[in-house]
Image (tube, grey):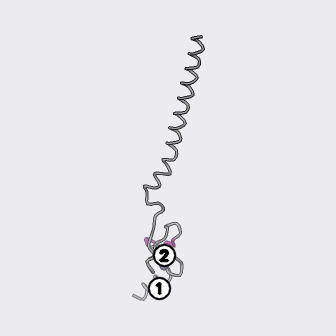
Amino acid sequence: MSLLIIRLLVFVLVFWAGWRLWQYWQQARPSEKTSDKDDPGPKMVKCQECGVHLPADEAIQSGDLHFCSIDHRDAYQSSSDKD
Ligand SMILES: [Zn+2]
């Protein structure tokens, strides 16, 4: 009789430990997503021609400068050439 209770207790303990481990694992994984909330997200850059902000991976890069489109890159470079 007491052996049955011990077995039951061990089963409950293992189940509880597994459940806690699962909870810990579930809390640990979304922390990658919550850390994204702390970060500003994708890096935003400003078009040197019109001043619009857009993600860096969508911007046209020319040296250290960023542009929203190839047209604005060409327009900025042609206007800077005139100066
Ligand atoms: Zn622009």
Residue 54: image tag: none
Residue found at the very far bottom of the displayed protein: 82
Badge 1 amino acid: Ser
Distance of label 2 from label 1 (alpha carbons):
14 Å
Above/below status of 10 relative to 63: above
How many residues crowd around disc 2 within 10 Å: few (fewer than 14), some, or many (20 or more)? many
Figure quadrant of the C terminus: bottom left
Q: Secondary structure at mark 1?
A: helix
Does the magenta-highlighted stretch encompass residue 62? yes
Whether ligand 1 has any atom under 8 Å from the Cβ at mark 2 is answered as yes
Above/below status of 83 relative to 37: below
Residue position for label 2: 67
Whether ligand 1 has any atom under 8 Å from the Cβ at mark 1 is answered as no
The x and y percentages for residue 41 are 47, 60
In primary-sequence order, the first of circles 2 and 1 is 2
Q: Residue at x 60, y 10 (%)?
A: 1
Q: Residue at x 46, y 55 (%)?
A: 37
Q: Start and end of the magenta stretch?
A: 59-64
The x and y percentages for residue 20 are 51, 33
Residue position for label 1: 78
Q: Residue at x 44, y 73 (%)?
A: 46
